[in-house]
Amino acid sequence: MNRYAAPQKEIRFVLEDLLGFDAHYSGLPSGVSLDLVEAVVEGASRFSERELAPLRSTGDREGCRLLDGSVIAPTGFKEAYRKYAEDGWPSLNGHAAFGGQGLPPSVGTIVAEIMSGANLAWAMYPGLSQGSIAVIARHGSSAQKAEYLAKLISGEWTGTMCLTEPHAGSDLGLLSTKAVPNADGSYRIEGTKIFISAGDHDLAENIVHLVLARVPGAPRGTRGISLFIVPKYLNGRRNNVLCTSLEDKMGIHAASTCTLSFDGARGFLVGAENAGLRCMFTMMNSARLGVGVQSVGLMEAGYQDSLRYAQERRQMRSLAGPSDPNHPADRIIMHADVRRMLLTQRAFVEGSRALIYFLAQLLDVSNDSSEAGQQAGRLLDLMTPIAKGFVTEIGFESVNLALQVFGGHGYIRENGMEQLVRDARITMLYEGTTQIQALDLLGRKVVASRSDGLSELLMLLRREAAVSEFPQLGVYAELWQDLSSRVGELSVENLHEIGAASVDYLMFAGYVSLAYFWSRMARAAEQNDEFSRGKRATAEFYFKRLMPRAEAHRQAIFAGAETLMRIQPAEFAESRG
Amino acid sequence: MNRYAAPQKEIRFVLEDLLGFDAHYSGLPSGVSLDLVEAVVEGASRFSERELAPLRSTGDREGCRLLDGSVIAPTGFKEAYRKYAEDGWPSLNGHAAFGGQGLPPSVGTIVAEIMSGANLAWAMYPGLSQGSIAVIARHGSSAQKAEYLAKLISGEWTGTMCLTEPHAGSDLGLLSTKAVPNADGSYRIEGTKIFISAGDHDLAENIVHLVLARVPGAPRGTRGISLFIVPKYLNGRRNNVLCTSLEDKMGIHAASTCTLSFDGARGFLVGAENAGLRCMFTMMNSARLGVGVQSVGLMEAGYQDSLRYAQERRQMRSLAGPSDPNHPADRIIMHADVRRMLLTQRAFVEGSRALIYFLAQLLDVSNDSSEAGQQAGRLLDLMTPIAKGFVTEIGFESVNLALQVFGGHGYIRENGMEQLVRDARITMLYEGTTQIQALDLLGRKVVASRSDGLSELLMLLRREAAVSEFPQLGVYAELWQDLSSRVGELSVENLHEIGAASVDYLMFAGYVSLAYFWSRMARAAEQNDEFSRGKRATAEFYFKRLMPRAEAHRQAIFAGAETLMRIQPAEFAESRG
């Protein structure tokens, strides 16, 4: 059933017609051409369709195995990784000084969408390396860069991020892994990390763990956390870090999720002591954007399969009379609610792609110290939790609609839809849950930062509203402004107002953000052909049928913290167990 | 993690304080006392907590096995079924003439909630028998009743419903299984049925399949379908019906979902030829209500576990300052959005329980030929698709919120939350998808039947609104009325308007129906204790934070069929593969 085809035409539309990537790329210091990038997209499509998509369901069934502290990935994964490395894919974004191709981050984002759509679990192995590369490139010493970057960029080695511990998930301040200095300047790492994606595997010859830990006497909480490089192999000898168990999970079975035991492992400090969390957070925007991208890939896969099914499967007559009188039943795409389910998926996946590619464009320039670079950074900071939190929430709805189009057949493993649902469920949890994204957006990016990024975004919305065929857009921009001020004012008296509003605020912000991109897409789809007509019809569908949800979220926020906080814990529990 | 405790106090509240089951039961011809029913609930709770709940996750891991055409259920299932039968649970609702206890159907509904909450997959084996009993009791000949009812009611045998075929799911008119008369009055059944729940297993000594098939010369479509009894064993010898494969599914792994091959099996006509679908549909209301009940059971299980986790897990400080200064972090129930997730679950599960027990009460009297019985039947007909379609949709949201409260730990199998999500996903699909329920509600029960049931329901809503502390209730009742008229009028010109509105209409109707019960529950919870205060706070939460969704669904309906039907199939497909 899974016949994933990378949506190259959709991607070209976003790059060329919607977001002006041509001028964007040629304006970058690195001066890459859009033609080159589109050739990369073509290559990634071919690789993903041929090598990765066929391993999606076999990898899910087989899962990973743990053998003597080492993990073996499912059949075919290692071979696919070898081709991936041979073809130079790991080095796309890497610095030229270390063998990288030096392409801007947005290219990696596009490639990640395609690879995740073909096979999310596989894409996680190389995906984690990108964060390690970014952290070491930014915060590592020259010696560390020399030692690790070339191997990571070539794909010979892969990387991990070791943050979570059993009692420290969202709350990293609670982590207790210890790092005790050795005489030679290295550190002795002791502790247990859980939920480490690609924490061990047999795809690459070495794994570079980036580990958060506390040095002796470090302050409590998040200000006492340091960052260490802990390689699996050190000068050819095994370091004292072992995978002690593999998580048995709802989905992404083919991706190893490891408990790593650091039992006096040798580690090397990155940056200064107690500055580890800040170092790790430099890659947080791109890591979170990366999860939003995964969600787009999954939505696309679900949309394609359910669309194909709706075009082939015949059940019942169209309510308005037979559309295929020569057959005993009509294709289910002729039923109005099947179309609602398809169009909802389409509106979500294409809207989310536009949003995320827009942010990837900002990412390309956000390290620039110019005013434009600064502004890009603010907008990126503001919108990243939307791209992660909101996009994964609608992504889960979207793949569930794909399953629903299949009816009872969607529940059967061999049709592949239920795997998409199981795989998608992780995206609302890792790299910060939806709740964490919502607090980041409303608490940190809107209320605490006095909404600089928001003002700039609202300016974009108002400018678009002035030329849009959807007059609601301007109204929503003003509502967003008012809502933000209102929650900000209420929070002065009661900080619970931020938590109480947070997820509904995130969802409101997400729907309005997508409205902005759908308005732009409707204008950009200006031809009189099937592609453009379909695009404009989807824009209209989005505004008429999905945007009313934004208002429901706004109304829920008006209920205030009182509806949540007045109730006593005992009143929750009284009647149970 | 799964420490399911049957919510007996909640159930008593609904029976005693909310729905007046005392007077209801004593007013029935059978004259059962509420005390007796509550003793049954207590017994079912004990049995489910001790025997069924411990098999929930082990059954999920082990799944079913197929050996030489026969299915073996997971370890412990057969033993639990033996106790279940020994204790007399299968006979709860059966006719006294055949060894049944003759309790009203509502008692079976309550027991089904408890057993589904403890272990949905297990509960499906005996659950399917109830439909078979109802059909044979109503449409079988005296000889058939004598032959089958006592064995089914004692639990020695179980039953199935064999409707679906590979190309006939929602569209039963397409089914092609054949039934050719034999000289002795029996029929020779040839064909393949799929997705047959409990289609084979080793819990009982015989299985009575109720099979839809076509006799020679039968009219095409649904008017040419006949109903047959096809026992697995006939006079001690195996009949020609084999399980040829087991579905590998997203969830309910421990429930066998069979492909049954009827290869010249002997079958016996029930009722008249070509009247089979009508016979089968006599048990449709209770079967669909049964799925709504399963959803309530799953929501309850998820709510209990996530509530317990939220009371124990500590992460981060409450935004308004430390609530437990002596610990390094606060319990997550002190975070506003965790409360939103808990209260949403609570509002859904308790509201749905009230709705479904209300319908079960109607079911008790709906076969009565009095005017009250007729009216109960109309209300039941109207509200059953809500109890199935809407309750399973919010049920899926609810168990996903339970998982989300656990954060990343919710994605791990051993914590049990992800199983609830996988298990719950089937409820939106079987016994008619959400889409089928929505068309049944809007197309058949509202537009085509001129809304008799709806008028009666709206009368109840208006009467409640007059005494409610939630003035919105009356407003929603009028909106429901207007919305129904409006869609009815539009559909005169374009029947697609019904399909286009259907699912949003179902959701609107569901939210307003739950509002009715939450208004009543707030009034019924009149004590000044934790139980009553928690109940009233949840009612307020429901009206303020969840009811705005109803308006979003209403607005979506106003978009009309045009937003869905104008777009051409090629415009959907143009940019993909």
Image: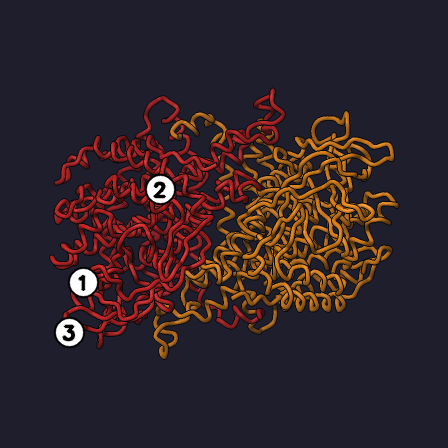
Chain colours: A red, B orange
Q: Is residue B63 left or right of residue A126?
A: right
> Which numbered disc flags the more N-terminal residue, 1 or 3?
3
Q: Nearer the viewer, residue A534 or A294?
A: A294
Query: Residue A200, percent across and down?
Result: 33, 57
Separation of marks 2 and 1 at Cα, in angstroms: 35 Å
Q: Which residue is mark 2?
A: A352
Question: What residue type is disc 3 on?
Answer: Ala
Separation of marks 3 and 2 at Cα, in angstroms: 51 Å
Query: Residue A554, percent across and down?
Result: 41, 51
Residue B371 in view in this figure: yes
- Comparing marks 3 and 2, which lies closer to the viewer? 3
Q: Secondary structure at mark 3?
A: loop
Vertical order, A154 against A536 (above or below): below
Q: Which residue is mark 1?
A: A270
Q: Is residue B393 left or right of residue A243?
A: right
Residues at discs 2 and 1 both on one chain: yes
Quadrant of the image occupied by residue B242: top right
Q: Which residue is mark 3?
A: A183
Quadrant of the image occupied by residue B282: top right
The crowding category of the residue bearing disc 2, from other C-alpha atoms within 10 Å (few below 14, some 14 to 19, many at least 20), is many
Residues at discs 1 and 3 both on one chain: yes
Question: What residue type is disc 1 on?
Answer: Val
Q: Nearer the viewer, residue B457 or B530?
A: B530
Q: Secondary structure at mark 2?
A: helix
Residue drawn 56% across and 53% down? B423
Disc 2 chain ID = A
- Comparing marks 2 and 1, which lies closer to the viewer? 1
Vertical order, B347 against A7 (above or below): below
The crowding category of the residue bearing disc 3, from other C-alpha atoms within 10 Å (few below 14, some 14 to 19, many at least 20), is few
